[in-house]
Image (cartoon, rainbow, N blue to C red):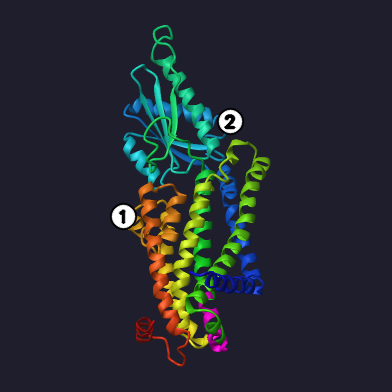
Amino acid sequence: MSAGGARNVWLVARREYAERVKSRAFLFSTLLLAGLAMVIALIPLAVRVVDRATVTPVLVASSDRALADQAVGVMDQFLNASLDATSGAGRTFVFEAVQDPGAAVSAVTDGSAAGALLIERKADGGLDVQVVSVGGLGQDRAQLLQIGAFAVGILDWTSSQPATTRPFVIPTFAVIDPGSASSAGPGAAQIDTAEYASRRIVGIVFVVLSFLTLVFYGMWVAAGVVAEKANRVMELLISAATAPQLMVGKILGIGLAGLTQVLLVLVPAVLTMLASGPIGNAALGGEAAGTGSLAGLSPGIVAAFIVYFTLGFALYAALYAGAGSLLSRAEDLQTVALPLSVPAIMGYLPAVLALSGSNSAFIRFASYVPLWSPFVMLARLSVGTVEPWELALSVGLLLVTVPLVTLLAIRVFRAGVLMYGQPPSVRTFARAVRGG
């Protein structure tokens, strides 16, 4: 592109940016989205509050049923000793012994139990204790279970044989997530309820922001083109700049306005998440339990959000610009609004499933489809289930698709901006493509 062409693109972009940012709709939607994001950011704190008043069901499983029964008795007496054991009121834990460790893990996975305590005897006589949890155990309760496991180990050592025969071996202890590839054995990362919620909250904020801004600002692109055609301003603009310059300038200016709004929404949301940890620690007590408030907001996920927002907006904005150029009246916008929003909706729904932890073949496939990947891949990244090659494939397909769709949209835009009085249809679209 020549220097004059780049200057025309910049002038159009600056004009579009100024018009959007100064509008009342921009201010109102920014305040609304910022308030919504701040409310969502407080959910991990609410999880901590609810968790404190919740009785945690824990299954105790071992290949040695006598050991499992003994562990249940010790845990119940030791961790609920000061409470009314007859009524169960105010209990912290409810323990139940089961025979099959696999069944206990399945119960945790399907949500029937908050955690499963897997106890096995090692070759040296000590105990190996693993707590299986899919975000159902807060860090404070996991620490209580570790203390209980230590008590089980002491009682098992004193009751099995004299202390002079075998030295006491401290039980090994780990909290693992059965859905994580990295948690295959002892030493796996501890899962905290607030951290678990935070990862998904960050994903929800990013996915919802992406969906709303891509559709909302895509409609602004189409509405801007239609308005300029309706009042004949387009005829003056097309004489001062080429159709590709006008379209690219509009996409760039409105895209920058969208990015500005996203930043204005994210800043108060991040500040709220930063404040929720100290507020929760001061109100609820403890310090470690609040460390997961921003666990899901890593530099990598922020960078991915910016990349997918930029590429996703360029893709959808080109579609909206091409479709808007075929319209002559603002009333006709409704005829293209729903068809153009359907791909975004179809991508948003699997993104919601991905945020719940689903990693099915369809979810993985959806994260590669360019029209869906800005939502689905972002959701998968927030819960940490993406291989590097999958990310490269997803971004690569977007990088290939965006210029191809933009070139097609330019052909439609070049013919459509001078097309008046014809209702939008598939035939109109095909004729615009051929005439470009």
In the rendered image, residue 279, in percent from the top left (x then y), is placed at 67, 45
In the rendered image, residue 76, in percent from the top left (x then y), is placed at 49, 31
Q: Is 89 or 33 nearer to us in this picture? A: 33
Q: Is 23 or 8 nearer to us in this picture? A: 8
In the rendered image, residue 397, in percent from the top left (x then y), is placed at 37, 60
| Residue 357 lies in the magenta stretch | no
- The answer to which image quadrant residue 269 occupies is bottom right
Q: CA distance from mark 2 to mark 1?
A: 49 Å
Residue 171 in view (yes/no)? yes
| Magenta span | 221-235
| Label located before the other in sequence (2 or 1) | 2
Q: Which residue is mark 1?
A: 361
Q: Residues within 10 Å of mark 1 (few under 14, many from 20)?
A: few
Give the residue displayed 41% in from the left and 46% down from the top. Answer: 112
Q: Which residue is mark 2?
A: 82
Q: Amino acid at mark 2?
A: Ser
Q: Is 86 situated left or right of 319 in this image?
A: right
**Mark 2: secondary structure:** loop
- The numbered dot on residue 386 is none
Q: Is 420 or 101 nearer to us in this picture? A: 420
Q: Is 272 or 4 nearer to us in this picture? A: 4
Q: Nearer the viewer, mark 2 or mark 1?
A: 1
**Mark 1: secondary structure:** helix
